[in-house]
Structures are given as structure tokens and as C-alpha cells.
Amino acid sequence: MEKLIVCLTGMPGAGKSTIADGLKSKGYDVINMGNVVRTEAKNRNLEPTGPNLGKLMIELREKNGQGAIAELVVPQIENTKSKVVIIDGIRSNAEIEVLRKHGTVKLLAIHASTNTRFGFLKNRGRSDDPQTKENFEERDNREIGVGISNSIALSDETISNNNLTKDELIDYSFKIIESWIK
């Protein structure tokens, strides 16, 4: 069987990383797209702030094409022994096209309201998480600018994460992925 590459997409704070962390315990390998950018920032001695990581993400895309971040995770996909790989944080159709060369790609979009997402991000505590509504809106606009709305629109399945518990969100995602395997 060809590798199943499950791409999690959605606006910042929708619940992608929560799902990815939960699916690790179900035996899936998880690759986080943002971590690739954070690693690149570290290699360049850049502080991992939201503005710095945002600029770097855009710079990598401008220099190496819209699929640049996906190209950086290809070695991790090829090195995994797992038949199912979860990619946390797909942002564009160009990234999806890169991944299609390495397996069967399915897109799972996670949606949550603006208020829900802002609350999740404020509480998450990553160095690049927005702490003000203004920073939050800037980040949303940057994500939309790189094409995330297209990958959300083309998803194979969508989960609404406004009133789910963490366990419900993970279980719902797991059931969808299991249905794709069969």
C-alpha cells in the first residue's frame, strides 16, 4: 500500500496540533510544518517570534516556490516506516502537489470560530502565538495570503471544532482517517 499522507489544514488555533498530538498516541507519525520553519529560524539565529517566523515562511516560498515548506518535510516522509503520516499545518495547494508525489494525500480541514481560535492561541503558549487581537488578525491575513483558504476549501473532510472536547476532536479525526485507510 502506498503511504497515506493526511494533511491537517485550518486557520491558526483551529485545533490541528491538538489532533496531531492525539494521533501520535494512536501510532501515526506526525510531521509539523511549522517546526520546519522554526528549525530554519534557529539555523539563521532568528528569534522565533510570530513576525519573524511569518517573514521567514514567506521568504522561503518566494525564494523556493510556494511548495517550499512541503519540500523541506519530504525527507521525513520518506524516512518514516509508518503507512500513515499526519502533516500538521498545510497552507497551500502547491504544498499538497509536492506531497502527492510521495503518497496518497487526503485533506482534513479543522474549522473553529475566530473567538475560539484566539482563545486557544492565547492559552497555547508558543513563542509565535499572538497575544493581541491585532497580532491575531495580522497572522490570519498572512495565512490567507499564502493560500490557506484554498486548501481548506478543497478538503476531503471538515471538522467543526467549536464545541468539541479535546478527546472528541481527536476521536472524530481518528475515525475519519481510519475510514480513508479502508
Image (cartoon, rainbow, N blue to C red):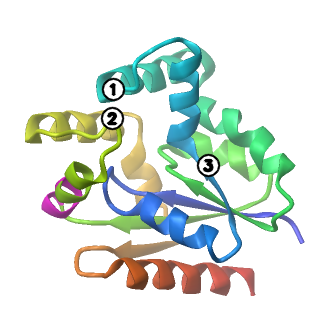
Give the residues drawn in magenta, as a range: 114-118
Task: Describe residue 155's horizontal placement relative to residue 53 as left or right.
Answer: right
Asked which quadrant contains residue 163, the reply is: bottom left
Judge whether 65 appears above or below 114 on screen.
above
Instruction: Tell me which amino acid carries mark 1.
Output: Thr
Residue annotated with mark 2:
128
Instruction: Of the two numbered discs 1 and 2 on the same chain, state the one appearing first in sequence.
Output: 1
Instruction: Of the two numbered discs 3 and 1 on the same chain, state the one appearing first in sequence.
Output: 1
Instruction: Tell me which amino acid carries mark 3.
Output: Ile
CA gap, disc 1 and disc 2: 4 Å
Q: Check whether the beta carbons of the residues at disc 3 and disc 1 lie within 8 A of each other.
A: no
- Residue at 62% from the left image edge and 67% from the top image edge: 24
Residue closest to the eye, 92 or 84: 84
The N terminus, quarter of image: bottom right
Q: Is residue 117 magenta?
A: yes
How far across and down, in percent of the image, does residue 168 sit?
Answer: 40, 85
Q: Which dot marks residue 96? A: 3
- Residue at 46% from the left image edge and 58% from the top image edge: 17
Disc number lying in front (2 or 3): 2
- Residue at 62% from the left image edge and 78% from the top image edge: 177
Q: Check whether the beta carbons of the residues at disc 1 and disc 2 lie within 8 A of each other.
A: yes
Instruction: Of the two numbered discs 2 and 3 on the same chain, state the one appearing first in sequence.
Output: 3
CA gap, disc 2 and disc 3: 24 Å
Disc number lying in front (3 or 1): 1
Judge whether 35 appears above or below 37 on screen.
below
